[in-house]
Structures are given as structure tokens and as C-alpha cells.
Image (spheres, rainbow, N blue to C red):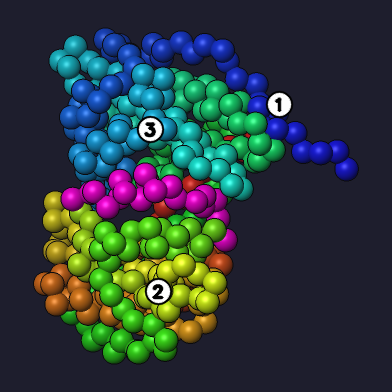
Amino acid sequence: MPEPRALRDRVTAPSTIELPTAGEGLVWRPATAADIDLILNLERAAGVVDHPRSLVMRDELEEDFADETFTPERDAVIAVDPDGRAVAYGSAVAPSSTETVFWVELDGTVAPDRRGEGIGSALLAWQEARGLQHLASCDAALPGWLAVGADVRATRTIRLLEAHGYERARWWLELERDLVAPLAEPPSPPGVRLVPYSEEWAEPARSAWNDAFRDHWGTQPMTAAEWAAGDRLKASRPDLSVLAVAPGTADASESERVVGFVLVDVSPEEWPLRGGPFGYITSVGVRREARGRGLGRAMLAHVLRTLRADGLGCAVLDVDAESPTGALGLYQNLGFTVTDRSVSLVKRF
């Protein structure tokens, strides 16, 4: 069989990209960090329609613009109306690390009151052109993806993407757990101790995350910079998060290593969207060699009690509907129920 060709040899990308021109009265230009407030206002307005139970946060945008892999003047565009309001924003961001796939994330939105004017189609065309340039920069013989995530309520976005050749590649389920209802007693996991997450555990926890998720769909290794950015977010709650720590192996330099984790964010600004205080479980994982010992159940049971003791009434998390670890069954067994769905749409190269 012939050797697989490098992605740059399989993708034809434009050498230059013209700014979009759609939308009466709009001025299109490259985005900058000075536009963060404009983008936030646009994202919040669109979110009421497209993802009404979650908010884009300002510090998330700040971290995005500070990321060394993101060059706003090349990777993002914004359209502003005569009143100075952002009407459209879109980006095409290359991955920080690539191991099994070169995944270019497309993120864009249009103000709800300006939809139906062809602005979204023009924005997507620009994003795809920039995305192709990213794909054509890859020397590895990897699959190339242009990918977009969408809540099922974002029906216009989903229809637009499918009309341009994107396929529904993966479904994600959002689950909730009422913390007022009785909670399972946290079992005592053998051979490990549970500790709160803290900065001293950052690198061991990142290593555990990369091991736990490297057999999950599309997931690429998380860099130290990406991990640190997540820790800096205001919503991050290390005191409510937990790590499973085990003795290090004989050939390892560390005396203890992280073999499992449950990480939590709390964002009071989002509480009115769900009718009360809740905690969002951002990640649950166990190193592959430590699976099958009940660590996931033990950590989750512990965290649910910690969240309730902190005065939160509900726990929320997202899961791959086809998770290879059987995570959905574990969550449902612990009392979580499905409340929402989202989908990843992908164009493959």
C-alpha cells in the first residue's frame, strides 16, 4: 500500500483570504483583543437562542486571545454595525497539539436579529478558507478536520453546516444530578487517597488527564499552557475538585502519582439559567491501568457530597454519548439524568 500523504499534500488552501462583505452597513475587519467586550455582548445575545443554559465568560475570551496558538489578526474576523455593535464574529483556530488528528476548531456566531441576510454563510466561507490554510500547514500524515460544536437548539447553524458538507460526527449529552435527593455513600477506593486539587498537583493531574482521554474520540494531548489557562478561570474550584493519588511505581521518579480526577467549575452568573446554584463537573477520568477498581464512582460520590455541603443544589456534566469507558452508565447509576444534547459537526480531509 502507498504511504499516507502529508496533510499539506492533500489540502488545497487559498494563498490569501478576502474579508467577508455580507450584511448591509457592516464593516468587516480582523478581530483584536480590544474587541473582547463587543464579542462577549454578541455571544451573550446569541446564546439566548443557541445555548440558553450556558454563558460565554469574559475571562474565557481573554484566555483565548492570549493563547500563543491564536493569532487574532489572521485567525478571527468581526463585523460591526454603524452603532458600533458586533453583529458577527468567527474564528478558525489550529490545535495546540496533534497526535492522531489535526483538528481545526471553527467558532462563529451572528446576532439573532441579523440572521437570514447571508452573513452566516459569508462568515463560514471565511472560516473554512482560514481553516484550510491551517490544514495545509501540517506536515504529518494525519486526518484533517474542520469541526464545529453546536447545541441542538442552534438549528440554523446545524442546517448551514450540513448544507456545506459537514456531517454530524459525535453526540454529547448533558446530565444533571439533583443534590437534594439522597446521595450514594462514597466507597473507600483501595490503594489510593483522595485529595483536593491544588497547584502542586497541576502537572501530575495533566499527565493523568492526557492518559485517561487519549482513547476518547478526537481528543488530543492537553498542553501545559492549556491546562494553566483552565486553572486561571474564575469559575475554577480546586477546593471542590478531587484527585485520586496512588503510590508511584518502582521505576517512577515521583513518590505518588495521580491516577484519577474529578474537576469542578462553579459560575454563579449561570445559576439563574438553571433555577438555582449548581456546580459543573468539567472532567472525570481514570488512568487506563487504574480502571475497573471503582475509582470513578468513589471520586464522583465524594464530589457530589462536597458540592452539596458547599450549598449547591445541582451537579451538571457532559459526556460523549459513545464514551468507550461506559461513563454514561456510571453517571446514570449515580442518579444523573439526561437534560440536553449537542453535536460535533465535522468536514474531513
> What residue appears at the point 28 percent right and 13 percent down from the top-left corner?
26
Disc 1 marks a residue whose amino acid type is Asp
89 lies left or right of 101: left
Q: Which quarter shows the N terminus?
A: top right
Residue 182 quadrant: bottom left
Which region is colored magenta?
A: 215-234
Task: Return the disc, 2 or 3, that comes first in the chain's sequence.
Answer: 3
Disc 3 marks a residue whose amino acid type is Glu
Task: Return the disc, 1 or 3, that comes first in the chain's sequence.
Answer: 1
Task: Return the disc, 2 or 1, that comes first in the chain's sequence.
Answer: 1
Residue 72: % across, % down:
35, 24
Closer mark to the observer between disc 1 and disc 3: 3
Q: Residues within 10 Å of mark 3 (few under 14, many from 20)?
A: few
> What residue appears at the point 61 percent right and 48 percent down from the top-left corner?
100
Closer mark to the observer between disc 2 and disc 3: 2
Marks 1/3 in contact by CB < 8 Å: the verdict is: no
Residue under numbered circle 1:
9
Residue 15 quadrant: top right
Residue under numbered circle 2:
256
Closer mark to the observer between disc 2 and disc 1: 2
